[in-house]
C-alpha cells in the first residue's frame, strides 16, 4: 500500500466511524467556550523584578558597564514577552498531543469575555501545568486507543477500550520521560559546545547548532511511528522506539513521505481553517473539519505501521529460516 493509498485508508476508517472525532471536537469546544486560565498576574511582575535586581547589582558595581537606559530597554523587551505569555490560556496544554484548532487561536467566544481565572502563585502554576500535561497525555491516549482498536481489526468493547487507554497513558508518560532524558543527556552537551563555539566564531557556532537541529529532525523522523507501535503493536515504549526505527529504516522513502504529508496537512489545515473563522457557525464547522483531518491522519500513520510491520516481520522470519538452513 502506497502513501496516498494509506492516507485514503485512514480517512475511510474515520468515514465509517465518525465517533472517533468526538474527543478532539469536545476538547476544542472546551477551549473555545470554556474558562481562560491565565498567569498574567505572575508574569507581569517579572520585568520590574528583574529590573530592580539588575539595578541593585549595577549600584554595587557588579554591572557597571550597563547603563540605566540599557537596563530599561532590556526590561521593555522582557515585558513584551511576558505580555504574550500572560495572554496564553493554560488549558491549551490539554491539546498538546491533539489535533486542536483552538490552540494558539485568537477566535473569540460567542459567550463574550468568558470566565477568567488568574493565578499569581508560582507553586500553583507549576502544579496546574503538571496536571494539565499529564491530562493531555490521557486525552491523547483516549483518542488514539479508539483508532488503534479498529486499525488492529478488533471489535470495540468499552472495557477493552478503557484498559488500553489507561495502559497506553502510562506508556506515553514513560515514552516522553525517555525522550526528555535523551535530550538532556545528548542535546545539552552539544548545545553548550555550540554556545562556547559561538563565543569564538558565530559561523562555527551556527554550524554546530544547525547540525544539532538536523540531528533532532532526523531522530524525530525515526521516532515518528512510536505512537502507532504502542497503540497498534501494543508494545512498551522501548520496543515502540525500536519498531519505529526499523519501520523507517526499511521503508525510508514511504515512511518519510507519509510523515512529511501528515505534518504538512495537519499544520496546513489548521492554518487554513483559522482564516475562515468569523462567526460561531464557521467556528463549529472548522472544529469538526480539523478533528476529521486529525483523526484521518492518525489512522493513516497507524495503518502504515501495521502494513510495514507485517512486511518487516516476514523479512525477519525469512532471514532466520535462511540461517537455520545453512547450519
Image (tube, rainbow, N blue to C red):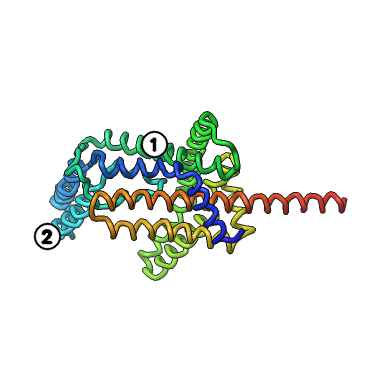
Where, quadrant-wise, is the N terminus in this rendering? bottom right
Residue occupying image coordinates x 23% and y 41%? 36
Question: Mark 1: which secondary structure?
Answer: helix
Residue 41 percent coordinates (x, y): 17, 41
- The reply to whether residue 28 is visible in this rendering is yes
Q: On the picture, is 206 further left or further right than 159?
A: left
Q: CA distance from mark 2 to mark 1?
A: 44 Å
Q: Which mark is residue 223?
A: none
Question: Which residue is more in the foreground, 118 or 149?
Answer: 149
How many neighbours does mark 2 have within 10 angstroms: few (below 14), some (14-19), or many (20 or more)?
few
**Residue 78 image-quadrant placement:** bottom left
Circles 2 and 1: CB atoms closer than 8 Å: no
- Residue located at (60% from left, 42% from top): 153
Q: Answer yes or no: is residue 230 visible.
A: no
Question: Residue under circle 1?
Answer: 135
From what the image shows, is residue 184 above or below residue 209? above
Label tally: 2
**Residue at the limit of the structure toward the top, as seen here:** 159
- Could you say which is closer to the camera, residue 194 or residue 232? 232
Is residue 167 depicted above or below 201 in this figure? above
Residue 117 placement: quadrant? top left
Which residue is label 2 attached to? 69
- Residue 88 location in percent, x, y? 25, 47
Amino acid at each position: 500500500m502506497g502513501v496516498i493509498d494509506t492516507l485514503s485508508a485512514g480517512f475511510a476508517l474515520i468515514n465509517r466511524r465518525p465517533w472517533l472525532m468526538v474527543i478532539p471536537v469536545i476538547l476544542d469546544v472546551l477551549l473555545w467556550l470554556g474558562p481562560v486560565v491565565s498567569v498574567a498576574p505572575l508574569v507581569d511582575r517579572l520585568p520590574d523584578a528583574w529590573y530592580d535586581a539588575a539595578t541593585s547589582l549595577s549600584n554595587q558595581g557588579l554591572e557597571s558597564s550597563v547603563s540605566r537606559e540599557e537596563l530599561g530597554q532590556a526590561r521593555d523587551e522582557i515585558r513584551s514577552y511576558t505580555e504574550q505569555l500572560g495572554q496564553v490560556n493554560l488549558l491549551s496544554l490539554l491539546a498538546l498531543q491533539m489535533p486542536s484548532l483552538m490552540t494558539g487561536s485568537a477566535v473569540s467566544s460567542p459567550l463574550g469575555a468568558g470566565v477568567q481565572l488568574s493565578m499569581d502563585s508560582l507553586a500553583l502554576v507549576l502544579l496546574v501545568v503538571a496536571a494539565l500535561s499529564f491530562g493531555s497525555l490521557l486525552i491523547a491516549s483516549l483518542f488514539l486507543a479508539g483508532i488503534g482498536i479498529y486499525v488492529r481489526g478488533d471489535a470495540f468493547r468499552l472495557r477493552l477500550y478503557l484498559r488500553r487507554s489507561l495502559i497506553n497513558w502510562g506508556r506515553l508518560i514513560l515514552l516522553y520521560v525517555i525522550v526528555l532524558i535523551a535530550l538532556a543527556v545528548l542535546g545539552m552537551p552539544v548545545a553548550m559546545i555550540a554556545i562556547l563555539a559561538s563565543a569564538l566564531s558565530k559561523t562555527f557556532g551556527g554550524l554546530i547548532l544547525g547540525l544539532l537541529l538536523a540531528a533532532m529532525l532526523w531522530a524525530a523522523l525515526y521516532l515518528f511511528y512510536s505512537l502507532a507501535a504502542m497503540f497498534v503493536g501494543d508494545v512498551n515504549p522501548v520496543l515502540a522506539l525500536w519498531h519505529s526505527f526499523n519501520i523507517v529504516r526499511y521503508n525510508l522513502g514511504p515512511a518519510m513521505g507519509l510523515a512529511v504529508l501528515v505534518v504538512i496537512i495537519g499544520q496546513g489545515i489548521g492554518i487554513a481553517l483559522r482564516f475562515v473563522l468569523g462567526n460561531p457557525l464557521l467556528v463549529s464547522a472548522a472544529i469538526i473539519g480539523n478533528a476529521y483531518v486529525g483523526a484521518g491522519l492518525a489512522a493513516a500513520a497507524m495503518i502504515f505501521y501495521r502494513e510495514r510491520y507485517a512486511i518487516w516481520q516476514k523479512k525477519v522470519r525469512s532471514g532466520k529460516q535462511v540461517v537455520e538452513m545453512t547450519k
